[in-house]
Structures are given as structure tokens and as C-alpha cells.
Amino acid sequence: MEQVANKTKNVVVIGGGVAGSLLAKSIQFHSNLVLIDPKEYYDIPWTDNRSRVEPTFAEKALIKHSEYLSNGTIINSRAIDITATEVFTDEGLVVPYDFLVLATGHDVPLPRTKTDRLQQFKQDYEKIKCAKSILIIGGGRTGVELAGEIVTDFPDKKVTLVHKGPRLLEFLGVKASTKAMKWLKSKKFEVLLEQTVDIDLDDSVGEFKTSAGKTISADCHFVATGKAVGSGWLRKTILKDMLDEHGRLKVDDKLRVIGHDKIFAIGDITNVKEMKLGYIAQEHATVVAKNINLLMKKGSEKESKGLSSYKPGSAITVVSLGRKNAVGQLPFMTVSGCLPTMFKSKDLFLGWTRKVMGLHP
Ligand SMILES: Cc1cc2nc3c(=O)[nH]c(=O)nc-3n(C[C@H](O)[C@H](O)[C@H](O)COP(=O)(O)OP(=O)(O)OC[C@H]3O[C@@H](n4cnc5c(N)ncnc54)[C@H](O)[C@@H]3O)c2cc1C
């Protein structure tokens, strides 16, 4: 006979991003759920660049945690420490847990309220609209996708993209980088590789010098360099020895932090050897929701029998190039044109992501 879930168990999720928000939503009716996130909303990272050129897009792309959590407690604070039984926040709260889930993928300082985040997108839009020339620093996913959005909506702007590495989109294969570069050049972008720009030195004057000595005139700039893993705050906690050299948490195949039966980690913060992607973070959330539900039924976190394992598969990733183009990498091939465009660029998975969260697309 199936046991009834023990609703008195406290499950605390730290991080309301792609992975944490889905986990919180999935487990809210089976536990005393607490979600800790400094923001009152879930910011879908792959929609942000479109919101910079079309601020109304953000209305649906910023999902308040209260929209999908009707049966949990939301704490808008930053976690700063944990013990084997409690989480401490920067506002002095102490939150007890039976099961803890760490989902602090990337720590990007964002406004606390949705209203302020919308305002930020409007300011970026005005900045782009008013500028004749724009500098983008960073040729990874964020920089290239932002470039694509700008050229689509503002084709008359002069855009320069500076990238430190030898090719764009270094996390993808060479073919994908070449396709993205060709596309940007066809749109009259200037792309400078193997150079950096020190913003702190140049910001106010509208002229920027690259490490190779080239001067770029730009009315505004965007920094799109890599974001740090959101684990800095764990360095002085009981998990400090479970961080690998990249600051990622070491987990077992059940996605439990090694040596800690009650603590799970999901999403980009884990050291699972795979591409760091949102849909994969959501798969982690699904596995951990199942495991915590089962452990709550069993009544013992030490009982591993029956727990689901997470097995990394081959990743599929698409980088949008505005609304009408994209470059994608499947396990054995690189694709561009209609297929990846239909897949991502049109609405940047917004409708699908909202559906996953149980909301109207
Ligand atoms: C431009 C761009 C395009 C992308 N395109 C795709 C795509 O097409 N497909 C795809 O699958 N993936 C894509 N990704 C990758 C995807 O966004 C990430 O893999 C995903 O966001 C990881 O989810 P996460 O929950 O682990 O972390 P995040 O989404 O980064 O969420 C982390 C959360 O933790 C919170 N947090 C941080 N520190 C603390 C703390 N101390 N206390 C409390 N809360 C904290 C943050 O506020 C945030 O809410 C893209 C990323 C970018 C930037």
C-alpha cells in the first residue's frame, strides 16, 4: 500500500531561476515548501536580449514566483550560509529544512521587483534606440544573441563586437562559430577577435580602446562576458569542500551533494559533465522532485533504494540570430536556417517555458 506523503517535511529551494522555480512548482503540494530568491520573479535568461529591443516582451517573460507558487512560502532574500539543518539569509532569517535544494546557477545582480526589471529593459531599449553606434563586449551566447536582436530591429546601427577568444561561441563547434561569424559580417557587423576592452578605463568618453590598441567609437556599450557560477557564498559553509575547481557542486547520480543525504543541487551549479543549459536544468529539477517525494514517503533520507538517477545525454543547443535566423548544434551536426529558427528564434521558447510553469503561453 502506498504511503501518504509526509506533508510536514520542510523543503527549501535556494534560487528561483530555471531549475529552482520548476522544482518549487513541482513539489509545492507535497511539502512545506520555501523558495529563497533575491528577486520576486523568475527571469528567463534566454529571453532577456529580446526584451532589450522589445521591452513589452518582458511582460510575459518575467514570471512572478507567486504566479506559479500558490502553496509555498517565498522569501525574497539572498542565502548567505547553511548548516546541516538551516539556511541563513542576508536579512537575518533562519529557515529550517528537512531537504535542501541548491539551484543558484549564476549570480547576476538583478532588481528585486518586476517593475524595476521592466524599467531596466526600457532603459536598455532607449539606449539602443538613441545610439548611432553600439559596442558589445563578449562573443559568447549573450553577446551574439544580443547582436542578432539589435541588427534585426535596428539594422541602421553600427555595431562592433569585441571578443577575447579566437572565435565566437566557443562553447559550440567551429562550424557553428563560422556560421555565426558569416551571418554577423553579412549584416555589416565589425567583429574583433582576440581583444578585450577595459570598460573601467574608457566608459565616459564614448571611445573605447581594445587590448590590441584599436579605438572604437560607440554611443553606448553592453557587457556580455561570462557570468560567475552562483556558488561564491558556499565557500565558507559546510559545503566548501564539495566545490570543484570551477566552483561547481559535486553531486552523485541522484543529484545529491556528495556526502550530504538531505542536500541536492540542480542546474548550472552542478559539476555534471554536460553542457550547461536550461532544458537540462529542468530535467535535473524533475529528477530531484521525484527523489525528494520518494524520500518524504519513506521517511528516511538515507534510504537510496528506488531513487531516480540522472544520466547526462547529448545536448542540443541553438543560438538565435534575431527573429529569422539561428545556428544550432545537434550531437553530430551543425545546423542553421529554418529548422533552428523555428525551434528557438521566433518566440525564444517563451510560450513553451510558460507552459512548463503551468501558465498560459
Ligand atoms: C543569452 C542566453 C541564452 C540561452 N539560451 C538557452 C537556450 O536556448 N536553451 C537552453 O536550454 N539554455 C539556454 N541558456 C542557458 C540557461 O539559461 C541556463 O543553463 C539556465 O539558466 C540555468 O538554470 P539554473 O536554474 O541553474 O540557474 P539560473 O537560471 O542562473 O538561476 C539561478 C537563480 O539563483 C538565484 N540566486 C543566486 N544566488 C543566490 C543566493 N545566494 N540566494 C538565493 N538565490 C540566489 C538567482 O537570483 C537566480 O534566480 C541561455 C543562457 C543565456 C545567458
Image (tube, rainbow, N blue to C red):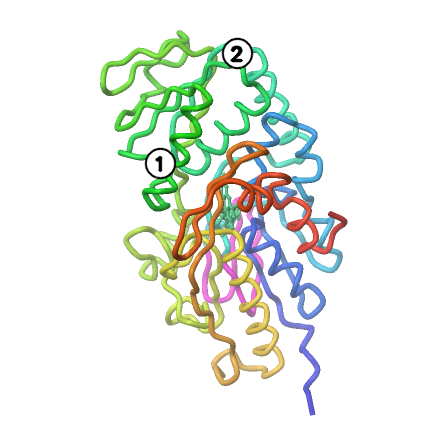
What residue is disc 1 on?
178
5 vs 281, left or right, is: right
Task: Measure how far apart labels 2 and 1 are at the Cα level.
Answer: 28 Å
Secondary structure of the residue carrying tag 2 is loop
For the N terminus, the quadrant is: bottom right
332 over 112 or under it: above or below: below
Viewer-nearest residue: 56 or 317: 317
Residue visible at 76% across and 49% down in the picture: 360
Among the 4 quarters of the image, the one containing residue 11 = bottom right
In x, y percent, where is residue 35? Answer: 61, 55
Q: Amino acid at mark 2?
A: Ala
279 over 308 or under it: above or below: above
141 over 273 or under it: above or below: above
In magenta stretch: residue 350 = no
What residue is disc 2 on?
131
In magenta stretch: residue 89 = yes
